Image (cartoon, rainbow, N blue to C red):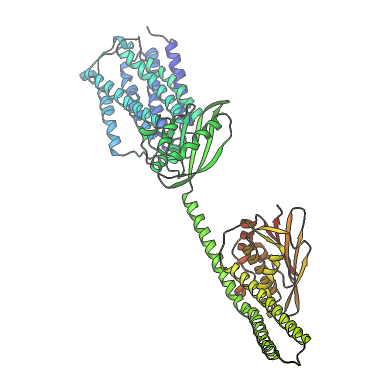
């Protein structure tokens, strides 16, 4: 006579564990498709366990033959492999959707359950039924059931293994837990079916208690039922950035699809190959070798930029070490494609250079009137001097042989000639300076290492701004608190252009009112040469001040040169390694300071 033994107690414990895990799997809201499939798979096991418990208790209490409960037990037995197969398909494919073709999987289980319920009429499933499986004699349909069950288990495990092979680390451990958990009861049943081990009807559901332990670990440790790990592989494959993962031997063990597509390589050509072999095809990767060696000896991250000629792309490369519990496991190399950024920066630079050229010529256009006026006066003076010299030459020519012209008269004529020649020299020197100044602004030069004195700078600014200051009836008040022979290094034409623009802004601040002054101050502090342009005009409101040096803006409206303070700031930064600051108060004036570091 049968009694309650240890195997029955273990069956009850297994059932409670399974019911708890079902409740745990369905506790979060909303319930995902993966949670539902997992719960249904465990539910089929719960049906088996509950059926056997009821079978045992009814036999002990009421002597009801156990075979009457086999149909109920086999509902769970036949459904479990189908649910496992569908759950595996969902696990490896986040886009999985249950369709009509999946419902065809239930045909064989349904037929088997019906044959079990009607077994006493045809004995197709059981020829002899017994609690001891080794005494059981199966009919032909039982072998169909076993083949179908193990076939689905095999296909499901293969899908999980293939998925694990495509992924690494987190995924492989997670998948391993699921495979071991599901394989345990399968292996037990295979061994029992071939009479390798002794089994009874409780052995299979009890073996599921071990499966539950592994599945519980997969859920709690690796977040098995979360959508995040399921979709993570798809996420990294849709990243715009490429990456490769190296082990501690610098072997490429993982990468994403963008890396394959971008570098035009195949999976087999790089997986399990040394990164040093990969650098043979891409010489730009030579720097990668030293970077990997550096991060392997520390936890720091290395950043650098490369250009890969073979695919004509620029990359920011980030090399990081992968460390677990203080042990170096490998390296993560991230390639951020910055080709578009580089092209945009080049376009911006080209446009900026073009803008500077255009603004310089626009500024020169405004200067033409002043330059013409500046040159007209010395030209007229030289013409007058030429006429006077011609008169003196005629007078001297007539005096030759004239007894009334004394030696002192000859010296007087010569002195007058020298006086006019001296005046001509002054005017021609001034004209030369004007031409030099205009040429400097008209001819583009990229030299940032010119050497010029403060005196040359002042002279250039004075010549170019003379007409505009005179026309506006504004006086430029020089306060030079430094030796005028002090030398600066940089692009003088760019500095002159910035100063002229600031002076033009200052003139504009007076709104056309005459008899005003602008202070032009040159001095030194501890670290910098400071050039200040100070006006006492309208000042700038806060809105304008907030935009200065941040965007292309001119404080002179349509009357300005258009160079803009943003470009002035950029010029000082780029060509003198200096900076441009300002102080302004509405209705009280503005002061701009050009700070140039003293070498």
Between residue 521 and residue 289, name the one nearer to us: 521
Between residue 449 and residue 368, name the one nearer to us: 449
Q: Position of residue 569 (x, y in %)?
A: 64, 60
Q: Quadrant of the N terminus?
A: top left
Between residue 246 and residue 382, name the one nearer to us: 382
Q: Is 538 drawn above or below residue 484 in the view shown?
A: below
Name the residue: 49% across, 48% down: 338
Quarter-of-image position of residue 256: top left
Q: Position of residue 241 (x, y in %)?
A: 46, 43
Q: Position of residue 464 (x, y in %)?
A: 65, 72
Q: Is 460 drawn above or below residue 203 in the view shown?
A: below
Quarter-of-image position of residue 214: top left
Name the residue: 26% across, 31% down: 107
Q: Residue furthest top?
A: 1
Name the residue: 47% across, 18% down: 13
Q: Position of residue 129 (x, y in %)?
A: 28, 13
Q: Is 567 drawn above or below residue 473 in the view shown?
A: above
Q: Is residue 513 left or right of residue 211?
A: right
Between residue 312 and residue 468, name the one nearer to us: 468
Q: Is 251 drawn above or below residue 376 in the view shown?
A: above
């Amino acid at each position: 006579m049968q009694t309650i033994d240890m195997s029955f107690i273990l069956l009850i414990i297994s059932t409670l564990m399974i019911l708890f895990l079902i409740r745990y799997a369905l506790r979060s809201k909303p319930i995902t498709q993966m949670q539902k499939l997992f719960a249904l798979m465990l539910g089929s096991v719960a049906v088996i366990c509950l059926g056997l418990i009821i079978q045992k208790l009814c036999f002990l209490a009421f002597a009801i033959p156990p075979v009457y409960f086999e149909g109920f037990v086999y509902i769970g037995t036949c459904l479990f492999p189908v649910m496992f197969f569908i759950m595996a398909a969902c696990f490896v494919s986040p886009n999985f959707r249950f369709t009509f073709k999946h419902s065809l999987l239930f045909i064989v289980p349904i037929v088997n359950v019906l044959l079990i319920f009607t077994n006493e009429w045809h004995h197709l499933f059981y020829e002899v039924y017994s609690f001891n499986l080794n005494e059981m004699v199966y009919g032909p349909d039982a072998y169909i059931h076993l083949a179908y069950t193990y076939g689905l288990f095999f296909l499901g495990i293969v899908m999980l293994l293939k998925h694990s092979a495509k992924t690494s680390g987190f995924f492989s451990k997670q998948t391993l837990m699921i495979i071991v958990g599901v394989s345990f009861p399968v292996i037990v049943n295979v061994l029992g079916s071939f009479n390798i081990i002794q089994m009874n009807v409780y052995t299979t559901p009890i073996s599921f208690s071990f499966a539950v332990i592994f599945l519980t670990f997969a859920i709690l440790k690796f977040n098995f039922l979360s959508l995040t790990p399921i979709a993570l592989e798809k996420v990294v494959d849709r990243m715009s950035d490429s990456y490769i993962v190296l082990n501690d031997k610098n072997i490429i063990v993982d990468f994403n699809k963008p890396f394959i597509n971008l570098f035009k390589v195949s999976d087999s050509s790089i997986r399990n190959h040394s990164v040093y072999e990969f650098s043979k095809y891409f010489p730009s990767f030579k720097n990668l070798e030293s970077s990997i060696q550096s991060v392997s000896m520390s936890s720091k991250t290395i950043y650098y930029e490369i250009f890969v000629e073979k695919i004509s792309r620029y990359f920011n490369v980030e090399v990081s070490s992968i460390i677990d519990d203080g042990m170096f496991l490998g390296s993560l190399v991230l390639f951020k494609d910055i080709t578009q950024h580089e092209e945009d920066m080049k376009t911006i630079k080209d446009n900026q250079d073009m803008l500077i050229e255009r603004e310089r010529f626009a500024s020169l256009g405004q200067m033409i009137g002043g330059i013409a006026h500046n040159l007209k006066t010395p030209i007229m003076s030289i013409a007058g001097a030429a006429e006077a010299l011609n008169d003196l030459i005629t007078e001297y020519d007539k005096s030759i042989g004239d007894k009334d012209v004394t030696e002192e008269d000859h010296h007087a004529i010569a002195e007058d000639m020298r006086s006019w020649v001296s005046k001509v020299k002054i005017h021609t020197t001034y004209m030369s300076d004007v031409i030099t100044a205009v040429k400097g602004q008209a001819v583009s030069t990229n030299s940032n290492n010119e050497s010029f004195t403060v005196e040359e700078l002042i002279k250039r600014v004075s010549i170019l701004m003379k007409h505009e200051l005179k026309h506006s009836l504004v006086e430029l008040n020089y306060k030079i608190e430094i030796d005028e022979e002090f030398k600066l290094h940089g692009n003088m034409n760019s500095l002159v252009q910035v100063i002229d623009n600031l002076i033009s802004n200052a003139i504009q601040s007076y709104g056309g009112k005459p008899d005003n002054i602008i202070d032009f101050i040159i001095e030194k502090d501890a670290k910098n040469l400071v050039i200040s342009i100070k006006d006492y005009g309208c000042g700038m409101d806060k809105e304008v001040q907030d935009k200065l040096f941040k965007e292309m803006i001119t404080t002179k409206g349509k009357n300005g040169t258009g160079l803009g303070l943003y470009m002035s700031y950029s010029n000082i930064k780029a060509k003198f390694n200096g900076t441009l600051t300002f102080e302004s108060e509405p209705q009280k004036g503005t002061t701009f300071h050009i700070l140039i570091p003293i070498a």
